Amino acid sequence: MNTSTNIRIFFLFFLFSLFFCNGFAQSGGKYTYAFLLNPSSARQAAMGGLLYNKNDHDVQLAIQNPSLLSDEIHNQLMLSFIDYPSDISSFSGAYAHSFRKAGDFSASLQYIGYGKFTETDATGLSYGDFTAQDYMAQIGWGRKLDSAFSLGANLKFIGSSYADYESFGLAADIALGYYNPEKRISATAIAQNAGRQIKSYTDVREPLPFGIHLALSQKLKHAPFTYSVVWQHLESWNLNFSDPNDPKIQRDAVTGEIIEKSKAGKFFDKTFRHLIFGIEFQPFKAFALRASYNYQKRQEMSLPTRTGLSGFSWGFGLRISKFQFSYARSTFHPAASPNYITISTRLSDFAKGSSK
């Protein structure tokens, strides 16, 4: 069976997976393990948090998009720390290793601790303290099908513990990647977080945050810029969250009825909730500036009286000796913004006589 036939088979399998999983798609707020949607590295966060697919051999990107795994990422190690508001913190780590026959693999861990809470009854009587945390262990695999196409998959083991309530589940990603070095174009289609809750917090099982996404990035030929566009959640056209108490809703002064947007306004709003725009400026090989805009986050997280920079993210990358430092800040809400710090390196660079 030749490579062209393999590509057709894998592409048809991918399409089948998308249509099969489409029936399990859920709108916002109706799923569990929402932490799976959080970026686990600074570079991901700076570029919008979802599926930045530039093919430049970075383990930070490959753990979210397994079709980027290749032998060029062999022996890379990544450690990340995320400082959320209210003493919430997150740690993650990843390592990539290539095997000549089996393909390219990654292993990663992600942990979020929500701090310590005091348990009380209705009268205020204290029963002691409890903690809450989410965690995930992931194994990724990728393989090049030919010079342009690649396939990747992640298997996720998910756990969650809130006081006496515990849950665990399984999920998987499957990604099909395309790379054209002459045009400097990378494209990815991915079905993400397809799975189920094995043990639920209560007697009711909840769905996972499944999504189908497309991503495109291209480096400009005569300028040190790479732009990125992500089409998120293609399994659902309407990503709007309807809140009748939303103060931003306009109402008729006499009847109190909601004033609906025009058809063009509704189409614009629904369309742009699917899009994430990002740009990376790399004037030198050892330094890069990054920024992105997420329209959906801006609509959902900004305050009626203070929109600020909600929906915007930015960051930078700096290489010093054998280490790559990345920092990002995502302004999801005017009240607070998480800080992302990532350090990555290639372990084989420390071997004696290794080339630069």
Image: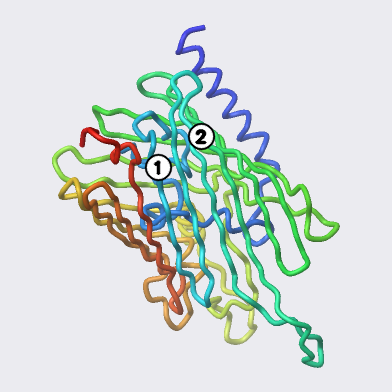
In the picture as drawn, the residue positioned furthest to the right comes out as 203
* Residue 202 as seen in the image, left or right of residue 256: right
Question: What residue did someone put label 1 on?
Answer: 59
- Where does residue 93 sit, x and y in percent of width and height? 47, 51
Q: Which mark is residue 175?
A: 2
Seen from the viewer's position, the closer of residues 167 and 297 is: 167
Which one is closest to the eye, mark 2 or mark 1? 1
Q: How many marks?
A: 2
Identify which amino acid the numbered label 1 is placed on: Val
Quarter the C terminus occupies: top left
User: Marks 2/1: CA distance?
Assistant: 16 Å
Task: Tell me the residue at 26%/45% (across/down).
Answer: 226
Residue under the point 37% across and 23% down: 148
Image quadrant in which you'd find residue 217: top left
- Residue furthest front in the image: 352
Above or below residue 285? Residue 341 is below
Residue at 25% from the left image edge and 30% from the top image edge: 183
What kind of residue is marked 2?
A: Ala
Q: Residue at x 40, y 52 (%)?
A: 44
* Element under disc 2: strand
Position of 251 with respect to 311 (left or right) is right
Mark 2 or mark 1, earlier in chain: 1
Q: Nearer the viewer, residue 351 or 78?
A: 351
